[in-house]
Amino acid sequence: MNRCIFPLLIICTFIAQQSTAQVVEITGQAKVSTMLQDDTQDNLVVRRPDGTLGTRAASSLPASFIDTNRTLNTDLELAKMLCDCPNLPPFLIDQLRDAGYSLENLARAGVPYDNLKHTFPVSDGSGIEYDYITIGNQRWLSSNLRTQRYNNGDFISTLTTDQSWIDANTNETPGLCWYENDQFANEIPYGALYNWFVIDSASNGGRNVCPIGWKIPTEEDIDTLLNTLQQGVSFGLDLNTVGKLLKTTGTDYWYSNVSNNVTGFSFPGGGYRINSSGQYVFQKTFGRFWTKDSASANNATSARFRSLNPGFDKGADSKGTGISIRCMQRVN
């Protein structure tokens, strides 16, 4: 049995010693018919994202399965040809990543970040599913966390009264809330607001609020994200402008907005809850999410966005403040 390796899709076609063509399934997406006499591909039957079928002739395929002169552009064109679609679906993007191309490579070659978004859900401790995106060597959930449980199933206290929120700050105990105590209106667009003690291992008993395999970002992770956007696909951007790539577009979740959200990060202006009073403030004006790093005895580092501001920066919030959580993981 001979094995032919297709360099882009990393697929194997096993050829039986017989005179008829053999049809094999490629990652559940397409079928290829192989002519055994001269070991060349006859034609390719492709299944488009909408479920319809198309074909590609052998003449449009490379003369050799293994091409040592492959480039990103030729691979992208071949991927589009195999898919028979203008935008690459996630399975082809994954195969290009497996072939060694970074997200920056793909973006430079003209693949929008919207098309780089993965569609396979990740589940948190409450069973809520999230999509995620990949930027450089990082994966990020594409929405704010809204779980009411740690990933081992333990509940996180939901604190509705001002006094309970103040007490959690004083006693350094984990707690979450929904803006203005309205879960129905705020859960999907903004996620929950959490104090920093929810993510602090010394306060939460060593439990993880992020989905299994995911984590709270560190300051270093935030710096990596910024550097990737500045040096990768966003030449000339700095902290004063890079935020527009990460915020939701329009004015549904920001009062004023100049963002384009090309990364699919989709960060909304969730506001926050003051540690010392329990008051909810600045929804659609400010959006923040925690890092794992403590800045001082009373403060921890957060990443920050503002309405009508294309910037993105880091600051320090009181550990008892209620702000968003955005989970991530390193790809490599």
Image (spheres, rainbow, N blue to C red):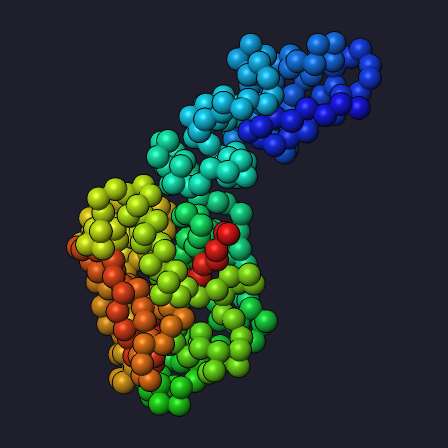
Q: Is residue 211 above or below residue 263?
A: below
Image quadrant in which you'd find residue 233: top left
Nearer to the camera, 92 or 308: 92
Residue in the picture at 68% in, 17% down: 33
Percent from the top left, x then y, of residue 110?
36, 31
State the residue lying farthest toward the right: 18
Residue 202 appears in the rendering: yes
Residue in the picture at 24% in, 72% down: 281
Q: Is residue 256 above or below residue 211?
A: above
Image quadrant in which you'd find residue 175: bottom left
Q: Is residue 132 above or below residue 165?
A: above
Image quadrant in which you'd find residue 164: bottom left
Quick check: 175 left or right of 52?
left
Residue in the picture at 49% in, 24% down: 70
Quick check: 107 left or right of 274?
right
Percent from the top left, x then y, of residue 324?
36, 67
State the residue lying farthest toward the front: 68
Nearer to the camera, 45 or 111: 111
Nearer to the camera, 220 or 269: 220
- Quarter of the image containing the N terminus? top right
Residue 161 appears in the rendering: no
Percent from the top left, x then y, of residue 294?
36, 76
Percent from the top left, x then y, of residue 126?
54, 66
Q: Is residue 61 above or below residue 283?
A: above
Quick check: 74 left or right of 310?
right
Residue in the picture at 54% in, 39% down: 98
